[in-house]
Image (spheres, rainbow, N blue to C red):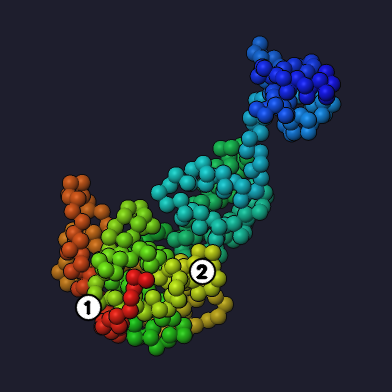
Amino acid sequence: MNVKEIKAKIKNSTTLRFSVSDGLYIKPSKDKKSGAWELRYTMNKKRHFMTLKGCNFPDMSLSDARIESGLIKQQIKNGVDPLAERARQIGSDIITINDLFDDLYSAKLIKLENPDIPLKIFNKNIKPTIGKLKIDDVNARDIRAIITKVNESGRPSISNKALLLCKNLFEHGAKLGLTQKNPAAPFNESDAGGPSKSRDRALSLQEIETTFDVLRENSTIFTRDNYLVMVLLLIFGNRKTELTEAKWEEFDFNEKIWNLGKRNKKKKHIQIPIADEVIPIFEELKVKSCGSEYVFPARKASKKGHMCENTLNHALAKMFSKSVSKKSYPNLLEPRGIKQFTIHDLRRTCRSLFAELGYEGNEVTRYLNHTIRGVAGIYNRYDYLDERRKLASIMANQILPRAKILMTSKGINLSE
């Protein structure tokens, strides 16, 4: 059968496929203008059709199709099932650590409650060092370099998580038959960030006032935006990125409600009451945001548009002379009697202050967007919104005077 005859056969074909020569078939396309080359063969007394890789007819000529089918027939003569061999090759494009992570992420990590966490850890801490290396080219020294660099940046818990992710990466590679070694296996937490310790740091009201005094005195190091984030974190008691990544559209200032969607850790919508006392802060932020959709816009050109998740951590670290940059800073807080604390400690501080003021019930649990435990958590669906409004006002009146922030609104329209 020549090219002209094949074209005519495709155009007038009424069958799923037709024979061209010696086990070589064409499966016409729906528009009857081309066709996929297929090879029919028998293996273990079963008949199979295999589509040839590459172009369809007429882009792949009859002579090229015969050459390709001849190579496949040689495999069959040698006892190799070409379809089974092709199936084995799936995954053969996983060559580098970047490829391996992409496969692990799509197969397993994407199913986690917070898949963004391992994604960020890989992209920021692992990918720059070994991402482009072939899987078997990575050695134990590379792993040590990763965890050492993270640990020296003052992030011991992230160092532990990066090590665990490295171990999981190579275990995944072993499952796929891509490697027989795991250069991360000999390392443990003592080589990375050390055993995890539950934190118990909470600031007293006096420490809060002193801290804000020092921060205001050093506004060139700790900017006004960072200052206001800290104030709001102490009042709202929520997680850092819930606030730093917030959009103006989430806030209903008529109803005094922050509608935090599924960005929060619980992945459930929650209404957060906004105390009248904090409205002046949002008025200031509205002016500073210059029309941005974010309450805290990025200070530099960024795809994300909002404040970087590490900005506040690094700014506070500078105040304790723990800067991750090459520039050194004096320890400005500890000489004033403030022991080191982290941004997440502000959330614990909020809870502790409520307890100090005599509030420890379910309303505080829901204020912090924690789950009410036990049977009460199962059957009690009340959300304590009115009670949380009262708590928001109480906390604002504890924090704002100590941060030297006026509680008088300027009447700026926040709904535009």
Identify the residue at the far bottom of this view. 217
Q: Quadrant of residue 404?
A: bottom left
Residue 364's place in the image compared with 5, above or below, is below
Circle 2: is it few (<14), some (14-19), or many (20+) Cα within 10 Å? some
Q: Residue at x 76, y 29 (%)?
A: 57
- Which of discs 1 and 2 lies nearer the camera? The answer is 1
Q: Is residue 337 visible?
A: no
Using a 10 Å C-alpha cutoff, classify the residue at mark 1 as few (fewer than 14 neighbours), some (14 to 19) or many (20 or more): some
Kindly state the secondary structure of the residue where label 2 is placed: loop
Q: Could you tell me the amino acid type at mark 1?
A: Asn
Look at 40% across and 79% down and name the residue there: 287
Q: Amino acid at mark 2?
A: Ser
Q: From the image, tell me which residue sits under label 1.
A: 397
Residue 393, x across and y down, in percent:
21, 73
Please name whichever residue, 92 or 144, is drawn nearer the observer in this view of the structure: 92
Residue 317 vertical position relative to residue 18 in the rendered view, above or below: below
Which residue lies at the image location 19% right of the left edge and 50% below the top edge?
381
Q: Left or right: 290 with respect to 264? A: right
| Disc on res. 153 | 2
Q: Is residue 220 left or right of residue 229?
A: right
SS assignment at label 1: helix
